[in-house]
Image: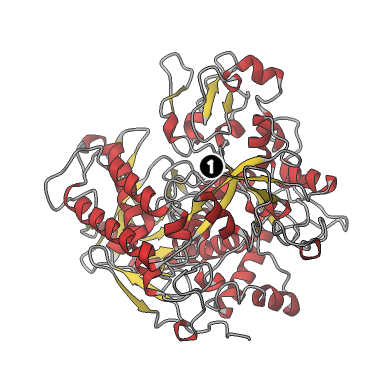
Amino acid sequence: MIEVVSTDRCIECDKCVEVCPTNVFDRGADGIPVIARQSDCQTCFMCEAYCPVDALFVAPTAEPLEAESPLRDEGHLVATGLLGSYRKGIGWGHGRTPGALVAVGPALPPARISGAPASASPQPGKGSAPLTA
Amino acid sequence: MTDSPTDNLTLTTDVLVIGGGPAGTWAALKAARAGADVILADKGYCGTSGPTASGGTGVWYVPPLEDAREAAMSSRDKMGGYLADRDWMRRVLNQTWDNMNELAEEGKYPFPVGPDGQQMRRGLQGPEYMRIQRRRVKRAGVRILDHSPVLELLTDSSGAVAGAAGYRRQEGTHYTVRAGAVVLATGGCAFLSRALGTNVNTGDGALMAAEVGAELSGMEFSTAYAIAPEFSTVTKTAYYNFATFYHEDGSVLEGAGSQGGRSVIARALLNERVFCTIDAATPEDQAAMRLGQVNFFLPFDRMGINPFTDRFPVTLLLEGTVRGTGGVHVAGDHGETSTPGLYVAGDVATRELICGGFTGGGSHNSAWAMSSGAWAGQAAARYATTVGHSARGRSVRAAGEAALRPTGTPGRPDAYQDVVSVVRDEVHPYDTNYLRHGDRLTPALETLNDTWRELRSSLYATDGDAVRARSAAAMVAHARWMYTSALARTESRGMHKRQDYRELDPAQHHRLLVGGLDELWTAPSPWTRDLASVVS
């Protein structure tokens, strides 16, 4: 769920208010968006992708974090490189290569069945269906 | 419905598209290019709404070569329970080929380039795809209404659909669009499971269609559950093809697998936690996975888990009719419904036509969305032309019932929360909806029927809560159609597996229609025309 809106980084462009598909943010009185309806957050990471200054952090958990979680600490998120990592990963932002250009997934083998004899399990990398499915 | 008329927005247009995912954007684009004035209304934000935008998808993009196309079609016959239609598959393959090439050449989608120097057009990254689609739609002159959930359809005196009414949740105002034709592209229903990007998909369109007389088809094919880390929303079942599944004590969960072994995981999850390690991916596979689906790694990277070496807990998240194939019955070749003026595209429409009773990966789903969207947009534009501008002045009535016009005394405005709880309890559990048995489906359906009767009488809310109440009612309706169809199909076919009817029954080689709101009915579809034949 959305956990962090960085007051230091936010440029008050309201892009997150605009793009959140479940309308989680409100415009704050001071210009900084507020997480007004966290329980509506579906943890889809789209706000992070669209934030031009990497001021937002969506924790990957489907439920709110404990107050003392390091994933709510902006300093920790910056130090670990997590803040802005999704936007970087999909290659959005000035001077980056769009991730779509290099998005060639692995050849997908038929599904392994746990506990089946090795001969019944496919060899990794020998499948034929490329890309995402 | 019009509590504060001074603030309200009233618009007129030729074509109204409801929903701004892949199907809705292709519909809006093609309607506009056919010369129609178009408005697109999205419950959230066109560009981020729905499961495609936040994920990634393969695409059923097959070169126009006879052998390749035949192989693509026949490979799915058995899995789909022989309910797909070759004529529809051919049309979708043709249209998808054209649409993907248009997306590359005109939309400038940055497809990866293969070793042969050719673009590889068999997959799409959701954020990029939908950002481009929004740009294309706007450039075509379509007016987009974001954060504007539609609450109900409008019909004219003949019963034809003539527009829709909704709520602009960031403005706090109501709006009405008078339209010559309406395309529903609202997606399927995942029952607020939080499967990636699906919480906007609460089955609103199917309810609205049923309220104006449309019927549904294939609603028994609604048992889709996707694998995700237990704490997370990120579903990407295909990558678990590389995984081994474990009990909590570290012993192997025999028979578990992402395909052909998912029900083993479901059965285990009823009694214990299930763990997994993606341990069969080579370093090359691992690197390719990171490029192919960036968001797959967000839960792991952010929680400090190495999915290739660590054992992490997994769950199954309900994807209902988003990945299941049931939806509004398609009554013509271009997304027509049985109700004049109303068209359907994408997941709100039944995907049985090309998938039968099963969809594995996303590739057929994305192909269906973009093809059916293109056709519905074009057909709606033609229809709007025939009814003409005078249609904008038709006298109309609002068709919404449940949660908008209760038959009895309105209850508490937050009563929708109780309704949502009932739906979750009756639909999410694996031993009700996934591992199906008549002894469990019957009481679940009775509970849902009771809930429907009660909500028809008293569920009512205004403004933003009206949207939530309507979504809750739509999910109850959806679940009732699902279970009514599931009980009527007394066999196992496609993804619909009955523990009390384990075999495929040749006498039930037909699609199943379901309809009604207060009283439900089912019937074999009389429109089945070119079903895949059963090959032994």
Q: Quadrant of residue B401?
A: bottom left
Residue ID at (14%, 53%): B407
Where is the C terminus of chain B found, in terms of image quarters?
Answer: bottom right
Residue B304 appears anywhere in the view: yes
B106 and B63: which one is in front? B63
Residue situated in front as seen by the camera: A76 or A55: A76
B188 in relation to B250, above or below? below
Task: Locate the N terminus of chain B and report the quarter of the image it occupies.
Answer: top left
Which residue is more in the foreground, B341 or B88?
A: B88
Q: Is residue A54 left or right of residue B510?
A: right
Task: Give the side of residue B394 with respect to residue A39, left or right.
Answer: left
Classify B401 as above or below A15: below
Q: Label 1 is placed on what type of residue?
A: Thr
Q: Give percent across and percent down for residue B323.
A: 53, 58
Residue with the mark numbered 1: B48
Q: Is residue B137 left or right of residue B285?
A: left
Q: Secondary structure at mark 1?
A: loop
Q: Is residue B35 visible?
A: no
Q: Position of residue B384 (x, y in %)?
A: 38, 64
Count all numbered tags in the image, as a single digit: 1
Against B532, residue B58 (above or below) is above
Q: Position of residue B147 (x, y in %)?
A: 41, 40
Q: Chain of mark 1?
A: B
Q: Residue at x 46, y 62 (%)?
A: B222
